[in-house]
Image (cartoon, rainbow, N blue to C red):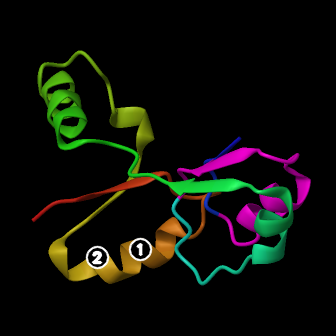
Amino acid sequence: MFEAVGVPGLINQAMREMPRDGKIVVVGLCMQTDRFEPTYGVMKELTLQFVVTYSPQEFRDAMHLIVDGAVNVAPMITGRVGLDAIAGAFADLARPDIHTKILVKP
């Protein structure tokens, strides 16, 4: 099972619902404090693995695709801010109904 959302409580829910000897790969990055019950993992002998979602090479390749025009990212950009407004941009990104990606323009 992959946990790719990053919402508090989902790791615990996945552990609770996972069958014995299951594996949970955590890809979603929870930006808040999260808790889970280790008892679920111990009693079911679960494997819990945390992974980095992208390699530096994947970032490089993605940047080339964007620069070359092979990927149109304009529909994802829901806001633009300068360096002085980065803190507010992170607060705004907590509202997924309003923002998807905010471009920082130095």
Residue 68: in sight, yes or no?
A: yes
Q: Is residue 2 left or right of residue 102?
A: right
Label disc, if present, on residue 86 of the rendered structure: 2
For this rendering, which residue is in front, 45 or 94?
45
CA separation in Å, label 2 and label 1: 6 Å
**Residue type indicated by callout 1:** Phe
Residue 37: in sight, yes or no?
A: no
Q: Is residue 100 left or right of residue 86?
A: right
Q: Position of residue 93 (x, y in %)?
A: 49, 66
Above or below for 16 versus 71 = below
**Labels 2 and 1 touching (C-beta < 8 A):** yes
Label disc, if present, on residue 37 of the rendered structure: none
**Residue type indicated by callout 2:** Ile
Identify the residue at horizontal 27%, vertical 79% (top origin): 85
- Where disc 2 sits, the SS reads helix
| Callout 2 crowding tier (Cα within 10 Å): few <14, some 14–19, many ≥20 | some
Magenta segment boundaries in residue numbering: 7-28
Examine the structure image and report whether residue 15 is included in the region drawn in magenta.
Answer: yes
Q: What residue is shown with label 1?
A: 90
Identify the residue at horizontal 61%, vertical 61% (top origin): 6
- Where disc 1 sits, the SS reads helix
Q: Residue furthest top?
A: 70
* Quadrant assignment for the C terminus: bottom left
Examine the structure image and report whether residue 12 is included in the region drawn in magenta.
Answer: yes
Q: Quadrant of residue 43?
A: bottom right
Above or below for 97 versus 74 = below
For this rendering, which residue is in front, 91 or 42?
42
Identify the residue at horizontal 71%, vertical 41% (top origin): 1
Identify the residue at horizontal 38%, vertical 51% (top origin): 52
